Image: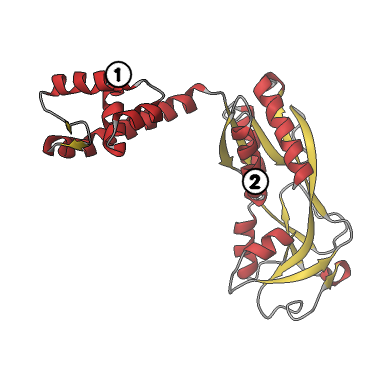
């Protein structure tokens, strides 16, 4: 019945059997027979036909919207079935590198055969727990990664700005040097101290830079962060000042459990490497 409804919609759109047959890749007799079968099954005449023209009957006009809905539902069903049938990688990633994660997902969706990617934003600790529990296939994680995981495709994000509250002594400067941070409470990702920066470390959990900015706004400390965040986040209660801290950076890597070394995982590794190479 679906083929008959498809033929009905095509003839209705073109108001001609030959044109509809060409669109569908069928012969004209096959389309005519499909319409005849549909008319017999429904008990209504769908078209008025003569040597010069084809017109929808009143019943045909009334049924056409339902036919289009049926075909749209069939397309949605087929698309969802194809999505469910293809292999899927579950990838955890820190929100800081969300643009890279999206680029990786697009690359894998565009390959042949396509590989689905389910993205899960997660900080370092949450990503490590998800990997250990088998809830995700791989994770982009700040290094050093836990020793239980295999890592590849390392990349660096330069830390070249400092978030300070309005009116802070460093707020009005055109730039801040590492030496200027002496005596400051320095908001620091848990387990990963800022190398070479003076100040009193105050840790925040799970690479949650958004929550750390709340601490900055509350006057609890200052936060070194990448330009990417300074450029994209707009807050009235936080200022971003250029920071010259030498080679200060956050290093990330793709991590996975040894048991997850599937062909799909290797395709993910390649996609990450390609995305980093072409960014």
Query: Tag 2, which secondary structure?
Result: loop
The residue sitting at 60% across, 73% down in the picture is 237
Which residue is tagged 2?
Answer: 94
Q: Is residue 255 visible?
A: no
Query: Tag 1, which secondary structure?
Result: helix
Seen in the image, is 230 located left or right of residue 4? right
The quarter of the rendered structure image containing the N terminus is top left
Viewer-closest of 34 and 109? 34
Quarter of the view holding residue 107? top right
Viewer-closest of 272 and 133? 272
Seen in the image, is 262 located left or right of residue 119? right
Number of numbered labels in the structure image: 2
Label 1 and label 2: CA atoms lie apart by 59 Å
Residue 2 horizontal/vertical position (percent): 29, 23
Q: Is residue 250 visible?
A: yes
Quarter of the view holding residue 49? top left
Q: 214 above or below 276?
A: below
Viewer-closest of 71 and 96? 71
Tell me the crowding category of disc 2: few under 14, some 14 to 19, or many 20 or more residues within 10 angstroms, Cα based: many
Labels 1 and 2 touching (C-beta < 8 A): no
Which label sits in the foreground, 1 or 2?
1
Tell me the crowding category of disc 1: few under 14, some 14 to 19, or many 20 or more residues within 10 angstroms, Cα based: few
Q: Earlier in the sequence, mark 1 or mark 2?
A: 1
Residue 270 horizontal/vertical position (percent): 74, 31
- Tell me the tag on residue 112: none
Which residue is tagged 1?
Answer: 29
Which residue ends up furthest to the front in the rendered image?
Answer: 51
Which residue ends up furthest to the left in the rendered image?
Answer: 43
């Amino acid at each position: 019945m679906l083929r008959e409804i498809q033929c009905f919609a095509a003839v209705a759109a073109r108001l001609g059997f030959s044109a509809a047959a060409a669109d569908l890749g069928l012969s004209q007799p096959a389309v005519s027979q499909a319409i005849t079968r549909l008319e017999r099954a429904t008990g209504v005449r769908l078209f008025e036909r003569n040597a010069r023209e084809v017109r929808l009957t009143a019943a045909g006009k009334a049924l056409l919207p339902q036919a289009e809905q049926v075909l749209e539902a069939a397309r949605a069903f087929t698309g969802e079935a194809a999505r469910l049938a293809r292999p899927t990688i579950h990838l955890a990633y820190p929100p800081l590198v969300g643009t890279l994660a999206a680029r990786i997902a697009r690359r894998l969706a565009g390959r042949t055969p396509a590989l689905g990617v389910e993205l899960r934003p997660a900080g370092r600790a949450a990503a490590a727990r998800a990997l250990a529990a088998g809830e995700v296939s791989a994770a982009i994680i700040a290094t050093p990664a836990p020793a239980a995981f295999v890592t590849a495709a390392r990349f660096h994000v330069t830390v070249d700005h400092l978030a300070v509250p309005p009116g802070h002594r460093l707020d009005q400067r055109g730039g801040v040097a590492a030496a200027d941070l002496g005596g400051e409470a320095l908001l620091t990702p848990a387990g990963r101290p800022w190398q070479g920066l003076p100040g009193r470390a105050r840790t925040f959990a799970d690479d949650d830079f958004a929550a750390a900015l709340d601490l900055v706004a509350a006057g609890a400390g200052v936060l070194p962060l990448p330009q990417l965040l300074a450029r994209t986040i707009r807050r009235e209660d936080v200022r971003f000042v250029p920071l010259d801290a030498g080679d200060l950076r956050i290093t990330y890597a793709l991590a996975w459990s040894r048991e997850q070394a599937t062909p799909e995982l290797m395709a993910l590794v390649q996609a990450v490497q390609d995305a980093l190479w072409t960014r």
